[in-house]
Amino acid sequence: MKQTRLVIVVPCYNEEEVLPESTLRLFQVIDTLKRQRQIDSGKILYVDDGSKDHTWSLIKQYATDSHIAGLKLAHNVGHQKALWAGLEWAVSYADIIISIDADLQDDEEAIYSMINYYHKGVDIVYGVRKGRKTDTFFKRYTAQAFYRLMNGLGGNIVYNHADFRLLSRRALQSLLSFPERNLFLRGMVHSLGYPSAIVYYNRKERFAGKSNYPLKKMVEFALDGITSFSVRPLQYITYIGLFFIFVSILAIVYGLCSYIAGNTMPGWTSLLVSVWFIGGAILLACGIIGEYIGKIYTEVKRRPHYFVEEYTGINKRSI
Ligand code: UDP
Ligand code: MG
């Protein structure tokens, strides 16, 4: 059997309340997998995304155990980039890489089925939540709308899959070869094309701490997802423009007809409405184009995703 070294990458931002419990549970998973000879070795790699609480001192304390390693980023760069940092550091060591959130809202027991799929030759296993019962009404509906919109725009992402997934070493190497600065990992992974499978689980509530994804971050994330993966909004602008031209031709024909028929033209209202409407449409179009130009701007700057301030339990680029 091929060698199987597992690394579980866990991004953490102000997670001091959940870390003790999460560490215990992940430990248990690794232990069971080892006993069942599903893996040769297992490690948890915590990425501290510039936390302001005691997350890093906890990680350092845990890292005295050889199964735990930590990476401290110099400042808060957001979930996707923190995860990317962990993946980059894990790739030289691991054969199997699993990413999971620190709050273990994603059922860690699903890891067993993920590893099973890996042994069957699957490179990418998506963790997909069965329902959104534990989410608030608001989060549930905004999330659903987001997936529909993304797929409608040709983004093609796995429905209800967040960032709980297994990657084989070669899938991860391919993912890391993507040079872009705007990270939208779930879309990028989906475009790799290796054999993949889905594992369903029930998403739990956070057992402690609070969500670090307020509405502002969620909207930014959704916009990022759409503009990093689809140029259809730009095409729609053209269609809308064409449609308006068509409407204005109709209006001209109508105006001529009523003039010939001797009717006086209707008043200002219709004129004013159309001026406002067209003005709004143009501004909207400019806004969408602006979003993409912003993307190009961050891409051409080619700034690094993160800086590492400290690490523990690992050697640079090899854990
Ligand atoms: N997270 C991070 N950086 C941030 C925000 C969040 O690394 O700036 C991590 C956080 O510690 C957790 C994961 O991303 O492990 C998901 O965050 P959270 O649970 O707050 O989001 P939700 O589950 O509510 O979408
Ligand atoms: Mg969470």
Image (tube, rainbow, N blue to C red):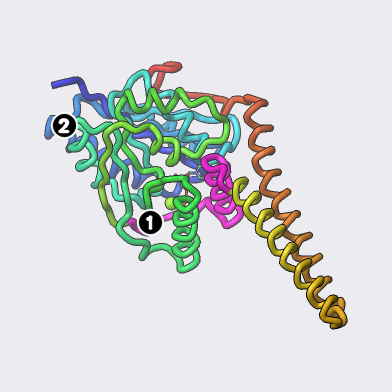
Residue that appears at 46% across and 35% down = 83
**Viewer-side residue, 85 vs 144:** 144
Task: Tell me the SS state at disc 1.
Answer: loop
| Residue lying at the far front of the rendered structure | 260
Residue 255 belongs to magenta span: no
- Per the rendered image, the range of residues in magenta is 203-232
Q: Tell me if 13 is positioned left or right of 285 in this view.
A: left
Amino acid type of the residue that numbered disc 1 sits on in the rendered structure: Phe
Which mark is drawn over residue 207?
A: 1
Residue that appears at 65% across and 51% down = 237
**Which circle, 1 or 2, is nearer the viewer?**
2
Residue that appears at 67% across and 26% down = 301
Quarter containing the N terminus: top left
Relative image position of residue 181 (x, y in whole percent): 57, 31
Quarter containing the C terminus: top left
Q: Which residue is mark 2?
A: 38
306 shown above or below 202:
above
Q: Badge 2: few (under 14), some or many (20 or more) residues near its Cα, within 10 Å?
A: some
Q: Is residue 36 at all visible to an observer of this figure? A: yes
Q: Tell me if 4 is positioned left or right of 57 in this view.
A: left
Amino acid type of the residue that numbered disc 2 sits on in the rendered structure: Gln
Q: Which quadrant of the figure has residue 313?
A: top left
Relative image position of residue 35 (x, y in whole percent): 13, 33
Q: Tell me if 95 is positioned left or right of 89 in this view.
A: left
Task: Tell me the SS state at disc 2.
Answer: loop
- Gap in angstroms between the C-alphas marked 1 and 2: 28 Å
Relative image position of residue 57 (x, y in whole percent): 48, 35
| Label 1 vs 2, first from the N-terminus | 2
Q: Is residue 210 at all visible to an observer of this figure? A: no
